[in-house]
Image (tube, rainbow, N blue to C red):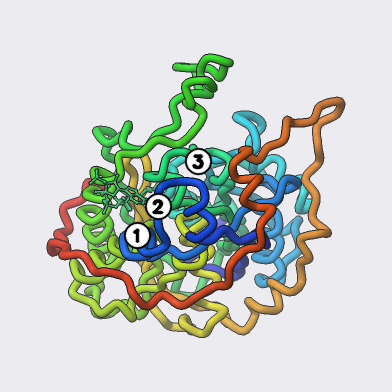
Amino acid sequence: MSAPRAAHITGWGHYAPEQILTNKDLEKLVDTTDEWIVSRTGMRERHVAAAHETTASMAAVAGLRAIATAGLAPDDIDLILVATLTPDYPMPSTAALVKEAIGNTRAAAMDVAAACSGFVYAYATAHAYVTSGLASNVLVIGAELLTRFLDYTDRNTCILFGDGAGAVVVSASDAPGGALGIELTTEPQGAYMIWLPSGGSRSPSSGETVARNEHFIRMEGRETYRFATRTLASTALASVRKAGLQPSDIDLFIPHQANIRIIEAVAKGLDLPMDKMFVNLDRYGNTSAASVPIALAEAVNSGRIKPGDRIVMVAFGAGFTSGAITLEWTADPARGLAGEAAVNPNDVHVRAPVDWDSVDPIPAALAELMRRPGGPSVPLDDVIPDEPRPATAGATQT
Ligand code: ACO
């Protein structure tokens, strides 16, 4: 097989569960206020998966929508990558479940674990597979069901995260475009700044680990914030420079949607106005590996991206990891809405195990909240900008 010159995004799609959890809802659970959450994070509401949904089911819907947008059939995909920190099970991979759910019979499938940077890492992997000639069409999905891994007595974390999935199809092309510059970094000294203690070989799940709440995400918010503001802009800048461009050449940044103040810091660090930053965290919260592909799909479908535009997808996450891809957009944006409409989530099913059912998957405190009606989406208008420092392109290349 001869290697193509480029790997283009030919399809994109996303999925968000119907149920909405507002800041006001969270006020009923922990000692917080809508005002605090909006001013410190920019978030107003987030989506919460229903009991019958899993990471794989959301991933499959987003993936099928991306395949429909690309004008392909599921069997045209020869590699499936699912970036997630909330897999359905430690094994099998969520990607294997997605492969079956979308009706693909021929792809290799595997998960990518790089926390919130996972989609960017998976995209870089897809690019390498396609440009080396090892694959022609790669389905890259970021999917998370974080609301089942949160301690609803911990106001530092439970207000931040939401559920959803986003996907792209990366296809071989001999035309110019696609990824122009890729930067990935990993800084393990931050490994325990965001972590989930139990369920792995160091501390297998047991009654004792559950009693110690070790099955929930733990986070040092301030340290993570410092890492993010320092690294996100420098990683983006390194990727832009590898593409032979300057930040002012970029039409739109698609940053990880962790905190509006972090995104403000990226804009300021790159000396760019906020209208170069796509923001939807007010409606989604932080959906970890799903945040960049959800934002990308919304940006394209809302007319913010057109052929010839240069965009940067940039993320940071537990590890600490960060990654940025500078790319030239080539696909017809009009295809996106039709692709989204082509797939009804009720028609997508992930096969359940034989003779086994899970316990009620939704934490009791959250289940109680979900019985109440959700609030409406409201525009992002009163966030408080931070005072970030300028970025430098000093990140470590891996
Ligand atoms: N409501 C009200 N008060 C709160 C809340 C809340 N929900 N959460 C924390 N506070 C309090 C704290 O207890 C603290 O009180 P104290 O001064 O009496 O001790 C005060 O607010 C200030 O706390 P900080 O942690 O300094 O608040 P900060 O402005 O840093 O905002 C936040 C906290 C939003 C968590 C911020 O640090 C942040 O966004 N960090 C990055 C988090 C992130 O991006 N995580 C995802 C990583 S990606 C991944 O891989 C999963």
Q: Amino acid at mark 1?
A: Trp
Residue on which the image places disc 2? 32
Q: Amino acid at mark 3?
A: Tyr
Q: Secondary structure at mark 3?
A: loop
Dot 3 or dot 1: first in sequence order is: 1
Quadrant location of residue 89?
top right
| Labelled disc at residue 376 | none
Q: Residue at x 24, y 48 (%)?
A: 227
Rendered location of residue 325, percent (x, y): 38, 61
Q: Amino acid at mark 2?
A: Thr
The answer to whether the residue labelled 3 contacts the one labelled 1, judged by CB atoms less than 8 Å apart, is no
Residue on which the image places disc 3? 152
Residue on which the image places disc 1? 36
Q: Secondary structure at mark 2?
A: loop
The answer to whether the residue labelled 2 contacts the one labelled 1, judged by CB atoms less than 8 Å apart, is yes
Rendered location of residue 377, percent (x, y): 54, 73
> In which quadrant of the rendered image does the C terminus lie?
top left
Cβ of mark 2 under 8 A from ligand 1: yes
